[in-house]
Image (cartoon, rainbow, N blue to C red):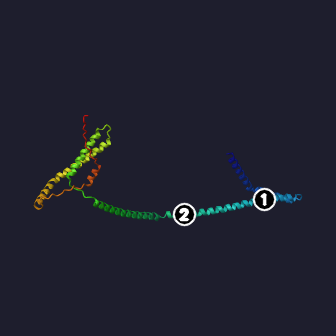
């Protein structure tokens, strides 16, 4: 810290000494000139003294010339700065006059309105194109969906009943355990309800279609007796719908049959 303080002090002293050397006192110069004039009028004054005084005066005048040169350079620099400031003032005046033009605000509003219309038309065209693409994709998806069967086969009803019994049994076993898992119980109850609703729906469909099936079967029997003499027609299982396949995946497998162990007396 002391080194930096000493360096700062030396720099301050050097600057002060340079200012004192450059400082020119008009009174001192006038005094030197008057002394030289007085010594030149005296007969007994040595020439060396006059030369020393003249040299001292010349040194002072050189300092005056250096100061004058420095002042001229500073004045030139200030003149260039003043010219640059004047140019900036002229530019600012032109900008201010342009801002004060009453037509500028109207031009800005007109451009904003045109830009808004362009963006609105572009968004409308994009929306129409997107809507058409969505409709085409929906139509393709609708055409690719498999047809849903409306009839419920007896085999499907029996399978659902077996599944329902298995779910109920698994639910009962889960509830009787010491550590009951509420989440598993809730899922089993939901599956039981879903299977019951599906079974009820299939039974209603089967009941509604039963008279029509009996009528069609009686007519087929008459035709077969007359033409083909009751030729047996094989029956194929009905294909499952997408909803039936989803329920089939979610339902658990039925529990294995209980094995009876016989103990023999030894």
Which residue is at a point 50% across and 64% down the rendered structure image? 98
Q: Which residue is tagged 2?
A: 93
**Vertical relation: 20 (above or below) 83:** above
Q: Quadrant of the C terminus?
A: top left
Report the residue that reaches farthest toward the right.
Answer: 44
Circle 2 residues within 10 Å: few <14, some 14–19, many ≥20: few
Q: Quadrant of the N terminus?
A: top right
Foreground of the two, 19 or 166: 166
Circle 1 residues within 10 Å: few <14, some 14–19, many ≥20: few
**Vertical relation: 151 (above or below) 259:** below
Report the residue that reaches farthest toward the front.
Answer: 266
- The location of residue 53, given as percent across then percent down, is 82, 58
Which residue is at a point 24% across and 46% down the rendered structure image? 164
- The location of residue 100, given as percent across then percent down, is 49, 63
Foreground of the two, 136 or 210: 210
Q: Which residue is tagged 1?
A: 59
């Amino acid at each position: 810290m002391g080194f930096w303080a000493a360096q700062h002090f030396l720099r301050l002293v050097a600057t002060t000494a340079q200012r004192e050397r450059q400082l020119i006192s008009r009174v001192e110069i006038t005094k030197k000139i008057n002394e030289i004039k007085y010594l030149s009028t005296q007969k007994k004054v040595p020439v060396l003294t006059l030369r020393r005084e003249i040299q001292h005066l010349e040194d002072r005048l050189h300092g005056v010339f250096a100061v004058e040169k420095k002042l001229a350079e500073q004045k030139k620099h200030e003149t260039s700065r003043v010219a640059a400031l004047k140019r900036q003032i002229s530019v600012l005046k032109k900008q201010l006059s342009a801002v004060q033009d009453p037509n500028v605000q109207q031009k800005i509003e007109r451009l904003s309105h045109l830009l808004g219309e362009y963006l609105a038309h572009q968004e409308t065209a994009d929306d129409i194109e997107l809507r058409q693409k969505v409709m085409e994709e929906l139509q393709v998806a609708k055409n690719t969906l498999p047809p849903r069967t409306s009839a419920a086969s007896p085999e499907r009803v029996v399978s659902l009943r077996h599944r329902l019994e298995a779910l109920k049994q698994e639910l009962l076993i889960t509830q009787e355990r010491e550590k009951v898992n509420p989440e598993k119980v809730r899922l089993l109850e939901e599956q039981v309800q879903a299977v019951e609703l599906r079974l009820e729906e299939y039974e209603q469909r089967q009941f509604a279609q039963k008279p029509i099936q009996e009528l069609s079967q009686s007519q087929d029997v008459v035709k077969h007796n007359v033409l083909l003499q009751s030729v047996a027609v094989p029956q194929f299982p009905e294909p499952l719908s997408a909803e039936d396949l989803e329920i089939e995946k979610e339902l658990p497998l039925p529990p294995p049959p209980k094995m009876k162990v016989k103990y023999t007396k030894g």
